[in-house]
């Protein structure tokens, strides 16, 4: 816009100078006609320039709206971008109507909370019939994160020089991380005494503790609780025994870039509880947990497990 204002000011100054010249020296009719045409050409040229500027602004606005839409849809935002081009066409290629160009691209951005920098090269070869493009080099720089799964994935994407896989997998990986965070936070707020997050909501593990002596049974892939009162062997009462399970929720990226959640159940129980578990329920609990995931899904399975392990005192505090 500043350049346009400068150009407009220069034209206005030129028009003013022409008017003063006309006032000082009366021109013949032919010169006056030529001057009028010149003035009309200047005005028309200026109007056309403004029309092209409006078209350019409209086009830029359209592109910005598309970028905003894609950023909202994918969560990926590009902050900085630069491009350098080098012509590698030789004299022999020119004679054969072949053009060879090397493009060097650099960009930085973020996908939600994960930031990245990319440097890659694209080699373009064009002839009379076709145009081919291939990525010849890819370097990915990730800011340090707590997600160890990303390191191996980034190395694999660099080795394959696969930009599409990187952006696609990164998007789904971050979405799964956000879903895990929201889910853990939800259960921590709903069951604050039973649920423990050692590393906060961003943790990959969630502990569920029960201050009771539970006897657990599994019926058709579901959980049922049969509480045992007192000390069966001694016939008297005993102090509560802590029974805890840990849900480990990993987010894996396979060789093809597909993002998959993997949940496992670990049990942490005293030796005395294991001795009382004659039906090996605790030993088979991880398998029952995985079966239940396939039937109910993640949230419903975690809800069932937490309710199962919560003591009656916790249950009464909810009502």
Image (spheres, rainbow, N blue to C red):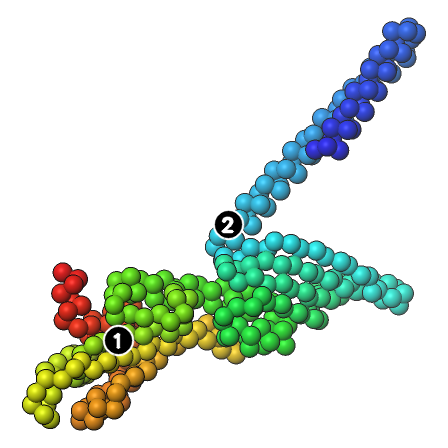
**In this orientation, does residue 99 appear?**
no
Instruction: Tell us which disc is closer to us: 1 or 2.
Output: 1
Mark 2 falls on what kind of element? helix
- Please state the horizontal and vertical placement of residue 126, each as a whole percent of the image: 76, 63
Q: Is residue 298 above or below residue 238?
A: above
- Please state the horizontal and vertical placement of residue 237, each as a whole percent of the image: 10, 84
How dense is the environment of label 2, judged by Cα within 10 Å: few (below 14), some, or many (20 and up)? few
Q: Locate residue 315: give its quadrant.
A: bottom left
**In this view of the protein, which residue sits in the foreground, 317 or 98?**
317
Would you say 170 lies left or right of 233 here?
Answer: right
Would you say 119 lies left or right of 100 here?
Answer: left
Residue denoted by label 1: 209
What residue is drawn where x is 20% and y is 77%? Answer: 211
**In this view of the protein, which residue sits in the foreground, 66 or 224?**
224
How dense is the environment of label 1, judged by Cα within 10 Å: few (below 14), some, or many (20 and up)? many
Disc 1 to disc 2, C-alpha distance = 44 Å
| Quadrant housing the C terminus | bottom left
Would you say 300 lies left or right of 88 here?
Answer: left
**In this orientation, does residue 307 appear?**
yes
What residue is drawn where x is 53% and y is 72%? Answer: 150
What residue is drawn where x is 59% and y is 55%? Answer: 78
- Please state the horizontal and vertical placement of residue 47, each as a whole percent of the image: 71, 26
Q: Is residue 116 above or below residue 150?
A: above
Residue denoted by label 2: 69
Mark 1 or mark 2: whose residue is earlier in sequence = 2
């Amino acid at each position: 816009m500043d350049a346009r204002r400068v150009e407009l000011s220069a034209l206005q100054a030129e028009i003013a100078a022409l008017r003063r010249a006309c006032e000082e020296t009366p021109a013949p009719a032919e010169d006056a006609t030529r001057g009028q045409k010149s003035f009309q050409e200047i005005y028309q040229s200026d109007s056309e320039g403004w029309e092209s500027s409006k078209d350019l602004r409209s086009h830029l606005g359209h592109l910005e709206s598309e970028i905003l839409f894609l950023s909202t849809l994918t969560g990926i935002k590009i902050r900085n971008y630069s491009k350098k081009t080098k012509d590698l066409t030789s004299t022999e290629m020119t004679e054969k109507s072949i053009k060879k160009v090397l493009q060097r691209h650099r960009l930085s951005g973020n996908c939600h909370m994960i930031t990245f920098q990319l440097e890659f090269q694209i080699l373009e070869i064009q002839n009379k019939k076709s145009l081919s493009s291939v990525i010849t080099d890819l370097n990915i720089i990730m800011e340090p994160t707590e997600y160890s799964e990303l390191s191996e994935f980034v190395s694999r994407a660099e080795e394959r020089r696969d930009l599409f896989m990187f952006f696609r997998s990164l998007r789904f990986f971050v979405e799964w991380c956000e879903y895990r965070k929201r889910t853990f936070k939800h259960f921590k707020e709903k069951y604050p005494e039973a649920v423990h997050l050692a590393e906060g909501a961003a943790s990959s593990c969630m502990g569920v503790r029960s201050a009771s002596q539970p006897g657990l049974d599994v019926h058709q892939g579901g959980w049922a609780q049969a509480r045992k009162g007192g000390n069966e062997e001694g016939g008297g009462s005993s102090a509560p025994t802590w029974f805890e399970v840990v849900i480990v929720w990993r987010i894996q990226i396979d060789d093809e870039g597909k993002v998959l959640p993997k949940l496992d159940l670990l049990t942490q129980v005293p030796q005395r509880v294991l001795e009382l578990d004659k039906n090996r329920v605790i030993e088979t609990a991880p398998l029952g947990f995985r079966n239940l995931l396939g039937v109910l899904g993640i949230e419903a399975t975690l809800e069932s497990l937490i309710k199962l392990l919560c003591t009656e005192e916790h249950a009464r505090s909810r009502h």
